[in-house]
Image (cartoon, helix red, strand yellow):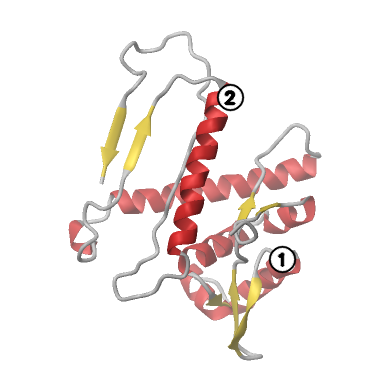
Amino acid sequence: MEDELQLRRLDAGALKALAHPLRVRIFDLLSTHGPQTASSLASMLGETSGSTSYHLRTLSAHDLIHEVEGRGTARERWWELPEGRIDIPGPSQSMSPANRAAAQIVSSEFFRLRHETLMSYVNRPDTDVPEGWKDTGLIATTLLEMTPSQMAGLKDELMAVVDSAVERFRGQTGPDVRRVSLRTELFDLPASGAVLADASDSKTDES
């Protein structure tokens, strides 16, 4: 489990290779839909297969994706993401200007796609919800007062739950199995001169 869930921190070369909106979208589609070919990605993205092939090769050159072993032909290659997690750094003043610009492109596009996916889920008509999947999701926001060490400890607890779920459900197949998105967000809010007295433990849930 430790090796499978190993966290890879992107170096400057890999970060720059990913710093293209179309490559971020390809990376996101491989994450969401699993292995794909240049042709299937081109169909999803409204691009040519030549364009997606070029970007796939660029991602592969930095080990961001790899070819699916034993699948496909010389003319139709299948690509997938490596096992484990990838840490994509946000823009930082400690970076060089070029690396900071690359991080800005990557993080902005990832969060744009993330929000787009969330809103598609929120606005999905009931008629599009598969049998048995209604009211199974959760969107929750909770505001807490914590110290830095408490927040770090909670982060470790949340990641332990996520890691356990990844290990328990990895590779599951069957007629009722669908890919789901598990999002965990924990961050400190900017300091404010006015805090609502009753906002310290507010929570909103939506299915």
Q: Which of 177 and 189 is in front in this view?
A: 177
Given the current orientation, which residue lies at the most extreme right position?
A: 96
- Is 58 placed left or right of 132 in the picture? right
- Is 8 placed left or right of 118 in the picture? right
Spatial CA distance of label 1 from label 2 is 34 Å
Badge 1: residue crowd in 10 Å (few <14, some 14–19, many ≥20): few
Question: Identity of the amino acid at label 2?
Answer: Ser
Secondary structure under the numbered disc 2 in the rendered image: helix
In x, y percent, where is residue 207?
Answer: 25, 46
Residue 22 is labelled as: none
Question: Identity of the amino acid at label 1?
Answer: Asp
* Residue at 53% from the left image edge and 74% from the top image edge: 35
Mark in the foreground, 1 or 2: 2
* Residue at 63% from the left image edge and 49% from the top image edge: 106
- In the image, residue 3 above or below residue 61: above
Residue indicated by mark 2: 149
Q: Which of 195 and 142 is in front in this view?
A: 142
Q: In which quarter of the image is the N terminus?
A: bottom right
- In the image, residue 69 above or below residue 84: below
Q: Can residue 153 be seen in this view?
A: yes
Residue indicated by mark 1: 63
Q: Give residue 5's quadrant in the image.
A: bottom right
In x, y percent, where is residue 89?
Answer: 67, 43
Q: Can residue 113 be seen in this view?
A: no
